[in-house]
Amino acid sequence: MSLKFDLIATCGNARRGCVHTAHGTFQTPAFMAVGTAATVKALTMDMVRDTGTEVILGNTYHLMMRPGGDLVEKMGGLHKFSGWHGPILTDSGGFQVMSLSNLVKMKEEGVEFTSHIDGGVKHFLRPEDSVHIQYQLDSNITMVLDECLHLPTTYERAEKNVDMVTRWAQRSRDAFVNRDGYGIFGIVQGADFPDLRKKSAKALTAIDFDGYAIGGLAVGEPQNVMFDMIATTTPLLPTDKPRYLMGVGTPLDILGAVERGIDMFDCVMPTRAGRTAQAFTRHGTLNMKNARFRDDDAPIDDKCACPACKLSRAYIHHLIKCNEILGATLLTQHNLWFYQDLMRDIRTSIEQGTFSQFKSDFIEKYTSGK
């Protein structure tokens, strides 16, 4: 058996579920903390667990570059190596095809990367190689190798991309080693062209994956275009398998995507924001560098139970102004805590049949500017 997905409740198109893996379960809709290089930056894994995070994400390309799949496998896999013993999903390296485009050469056989570390050594990554490295990492959810396009792009380029990543998806599926509690997800592409999204979804569901991701969004297009592509794609995906929107996003992006049937999310936003002095709250974001917090004795968010919110805004501001590492640690943990509280509240509202009202109330408060 592969990993198992239980659909527990629905509210409109919003779904409440649970994914079972060999390293435990996680509740959906789920937000995965990004641990690109086997670490969620600025936090220990115990701190990550304390936020309510149940599943984290690692990155095949970066872990291939250092320390290498062979070493991680020798050390007992990513769970033992990092100290995170819950479920792990690994991105295949497809996003780096876009983010490191000046260091990449695309071929039918795979991708040639010039090392971003020393700029000299070349590495060739085929779909089969990506799947094998993810096997070495002991990833619970393997992602197929694809190519993420930046938007806008031409129809011809997007169609060529869909055809190639479909061939790569089949090669990835063929290379995957089936094991109890492990699975592999296909990635729907098609840029912002509805007919190409449909073509990609149809081809991938015919291959039969354990779950399906929607890729190539939140890469330059307006939010309404992203929502349109999600709404186009999700009805074409199996209802009994999880759906993952890659690299998204803001709290408002997440709410809109849940409304359109998405189960899983990841984004560097809450952790990156924590390292740059931005705090998420139920009333919007705060820049903790701002001088107005110098003598503010209120917590960042009075509804949050994280360690940072047991302290004053003035103290957090002081840490940031002094460039103390603790400031980045506390804000990163707070932001992940905020995201996980949001996901928990989303799940509860779906179970209670009140998701639409919850979404409306949250957006009103979050965008009020108060």
Image: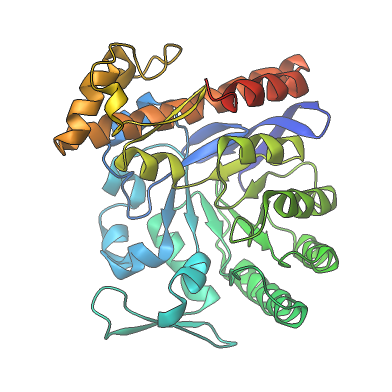
Residue shown at the point (45%, 44%) measured from the top left: 269
Q: Is residue 131 visible?
A: no
Which is nearer the eye, 161 or 359? Answer: 359
User: Can you see residue 148?
Assistant: yes
Relative to 256, residue 163 above or below: below
In this view, 233 is above or below 310? below
Residue 319 point in image, percent of width and height: 18, 30
Whether residue 159 is situated above or below residue 222 in the rendered picture: below
Q: x, y (%) of residue 42?
A: 26, 40
- The picture places residue 300, in percent across and down from the top left corner, at 37, 20
Side (left or right) of 302 relative to 350? left
Residue drawn where x is 37% and y is 27% of the image: 334
Nearer the observer, 214 or 145: 214
Query: Which quadrant of the view contains residue 348?
Result: top right
Query: In the rendered image, which quarter is residue 337 located in?
Result: top left
Q: Residue at x 75, y 35 (%)?
A: 259
Measuring from the top left, give residue 235's x and y in whole percent.
84, 48
Residue positioned most to the front: 292
